[in-house]
Image (cartoon, helix red, strand yellow):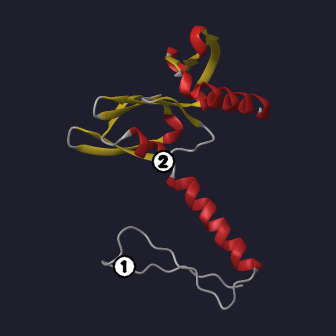
Amino acid sequence: MDVRFRFVEDDTVDGIEITVRAKNRDHKVEALFEAILSKLSQNAKKMLACQAFYEKYNINLDDVILLMRDGRYVTAVTTNGDHIIKDALSRAEELLDPIWFVRISQSEIVNLKYLEHWDFVSGGFIQIRMANGIKCYTSRRYTKQIREKIQKRRIGR
């Protein structure tokens, strides 16, 4: 099977449009299509748009330790410092990998890659200690879901 890529500049398209054209839709085309989608999804979810004053930039999602709602904005605590995201926490959550990022309360999402220790404390809360000495507490609403996800991660190691 011969595969060709070409770029077509089109002012009417908002974003990027990818079209796969083939004579027949067989297993080779399906496999190629799945491989392309897999590669694109791996790369697309690696960056998060941030803004400092009027300067816009991207941060790598692999560096994010914690996302927390801070008034009208969301603060991303990373290994390189804190960054402000001018977007809702729920919208930022859509960009995150659900395997690694877990919502622990209405206002916080943590990256399990940076989880150092977790422990049950009174009242059904879980205390989570993250990298860089960050301590978080879960809300009771999310405790069961978090415990299951953390235990799956522990078994998977």
Q: Give percent across and percent down for residue 11.
A: 30, 77
**Residue 62 in the image: above or below residue 11:** above
Mark 2 vs 1, N-terminal side: 1
How many numbered marks appear?
Answer: 2
Q: Give percent across and percent down for residue 68.
A: 41, 29
Q: Give percent across and percent down for residue 49.
A: 37, 46
Nearest to viewer (mark 2 / mark 1) = 2
Classify the position of the N terminus by image quarter.
Answer: bottom right
Query: Taking 18 as reference, is 53 left or right?
Result: left
**Residue 136 in the image: above or below residue 75:** above
Q: Quadrant of residue 52?
A: top left
Is disc 2 in contact with disc 1, using a CB cutoff of under 8 Å?
no
Query: Taking 38 as reference, is 109 left or right?
Result: left
- Residue at x-position 72% and y-position 72%: 31
| C-alpha span from label 2 to label 1 | 28 Å
Residue 135 vs residue 40, the one in the foreground: 135
- Outermost residue on the top side: it is 122
Q: Residues within 10 Å of mark 2 (few under 14, many from 20)?
A: few
Residue position marked by numbered label 1 in the rendering: 9
Dot 2 amino acid type: Glu
- Residue at x-position 54% and y-position 79%: 5
Q: Residues within 10 Å of mark 1 (few under 14, many from 20)?
A: few
Residue position marked by numbered label 2 in the rendering: 94
Residue 98 vs residue 13, the one in the foreground: 98
Residue 6 vs residue 16, the one in the foreground: 16
Dot 1 amino acid type: Glu
Q: Quadrant of residue 125?
A: top right
